[in-house]
Image: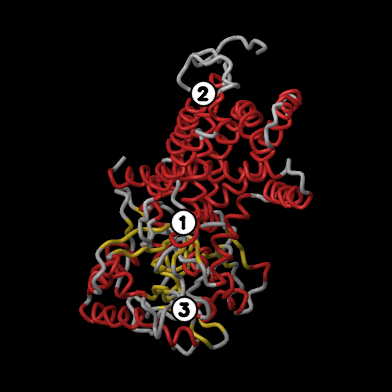
Amino acid sequence: MSAGLMAYVWEGLRNTLLLTVFGALLGLAFAFIAGLARTSKRKTVRAIAMVYTEVFRGFPSLVLLFALIFIIPQFGYQLNPLFAGILALALNIGAYAAEVVRGAIRAVPPGQIEAAVALNFTPMQRMRKVVLPQAVVAMIPPFTNNLIELLKQTSLVSLVYISDLTFSAQLIRASTGETALVFFGLLVGYGVIALVFVTIMKLLERMAARSLGRKVPSGLFGAKEVAA
Amino acid sequence: MEIFRTDCAQTGDLPRVSAIESALRSHRLTPMGRTGSYEYVNSSSLNRRGFLRGASGLTLGLAVGGGALVSGCTSISVAAGGEGGDLLNRLRDEGNVRMGFANERPFGFINREGVLTGEAPEVGKEIFRRLGVDSFEPKLADFSSLIPGLKAGLFDVISAGMYITPARCAEIEFTNPDYNAPAALLLPQGNPMGLSDLDSVVEKRARIGVLTGSVEEGYARDVGIPGGRVVVFPDQSSGIDGVLASRADCLMLTRLSLVAALGERQGMALEVGETFVPIVNGQKQYGAGGFGFRKGETAIVDEFNRELAAMQRSGDVLRLTRPFGFSQDEMTDLTAQALCTGTAD
């Protein structure tokens, strides 16, 4: 393949990684805000978080992308397309991950919270020092799922003409006519990127578990799960 | 942040993140933090508060960085500023123009070297060079998304050889056309029905093949060919196959497209008829294409037209477009104004 076409591949790869990483970080912020808000004592806070979660979980990312890129400019304001892509993906994946956050917080044994109350922790300290450290460990495996889902969702931005990996591949396909080769390469490419992200998340999971004094077996395949 | 390709000040997001982290770190010195009563096994240097602190620092840092982005660096300007717009000045400052195209040969496409080329990009690049912009960034879009994409600011100019029609003129500004592609009929070899133009198709009660959604489809209906004799094909190659298989007596497209398509399929029992300009309701229907800019950007359109006229006079347009199958037949001196108001003849 010519150097000119390779330049499109690198640009596409860069944009796909940017969309995934920034989408994940922004989505993580949304997830924690909404997930924690859903455990709030105040009904209005819970309601707002619930509306966010349900709206953006039910809203196709593609429609959101079209809205951000093609509808907002009609009001005379245009988001940078790449940022619009990140925002749309983050809103969507954040809504999914918010449920992960909520679920993990609910899963912390009540005895832990009772102990914290007995030790005269304020609600804030309870959350920061007792609940979250345990909940975060439980969040990481489902977050890994969300991250891989996000990585694959980034290919949607090619439909609004942001030059991600899929978009570059389509361009190369159109100029060389190598349909089979291009799509096979794309398949392998996404697979490899996903593997890299999975590995990073595995390391994070191990770090988080170790901080609780638990051990996660090393190696790609791990070992037989034993009850902690 | 350079990655968002905006001209906002790079007000160090990283120092801000580390400021948050150090704030979090100092927070550790609260009495409760020092007790360490929850660090039950802890052989490694990593403790759970450290892990959480890192995670929350990152998230907070992102929220701050994201806030900075939202506040100034994430938008791009789509409004035409001032009288006649300031697009040309902006492009000169950036030294770069983003050209929208639809990957259609021979009008605008990416070649095997990965370079944007074709009739419109080659003429457009030369004109932009003369206007002082030397770098070109190809921006691919579907043909039907070129106008929405231009309006949404995904690119600065449509350079796809887009036909200038009154409906499109209502949406965007057009430069004068740099080519006019007269229509022709693709016919079985020997032209058994003696077809020459749209009128002859009506007279001889022939079945005309057109591509779906094309201007020719509209012309065929407007000159009164009944629906049963208008054969709609999804794309060029099935149209050619349709004529070969006698599903239609002819296929109407521009001479350019027909010659290009036949070039790829040598040795078929087909021929391309004489060129003609279709006449619908007494009006000549030109297939004249130009470059599109956002509404209100008239200053750059005027400059563009001036350079285009000079290139047309010197024969540079023909020289640049000949490699793509254009000939003297396709050169034109029509104006965008005449085409937009439907007064061209």
Quick check: B134 left or right of A49?
left
Q: CA distance from mark 2 to mark 1?
A: 32 Å
Residue positioned 70% across, 36% down in the render: A102
Q: Earlier in the sequence, mark 2 or mark 1?
A: 2
Q: Nearer the viewer, residue A204 or B200?
A: A204
In the structure shown, which secondary structural element does the residue marked by tag 1 occupy?
helix
Which residue has dot 2 on it? B47
Disc 3 marks a residue whose amino acid type is Lys
For label 2, count other residues whose C-alpha is less than 10 Å away and answer few (under 14), some (14-19) or many (20+): many
Which residue has dot 1 on it? B68
Q: Nearer the viewer, residue B119 or A7?
A: A7
Residue positioned 36% across, 62% down in the render: B7
Residue positioned 37% across, 43% down in the render: A9
Discs 2 and 1 lie in a common subunit: yes
Quick check: B257 left or right of B124?
right
In the structure shown, which secondary structural element does the residue marked by tag 2 occupy?
loop
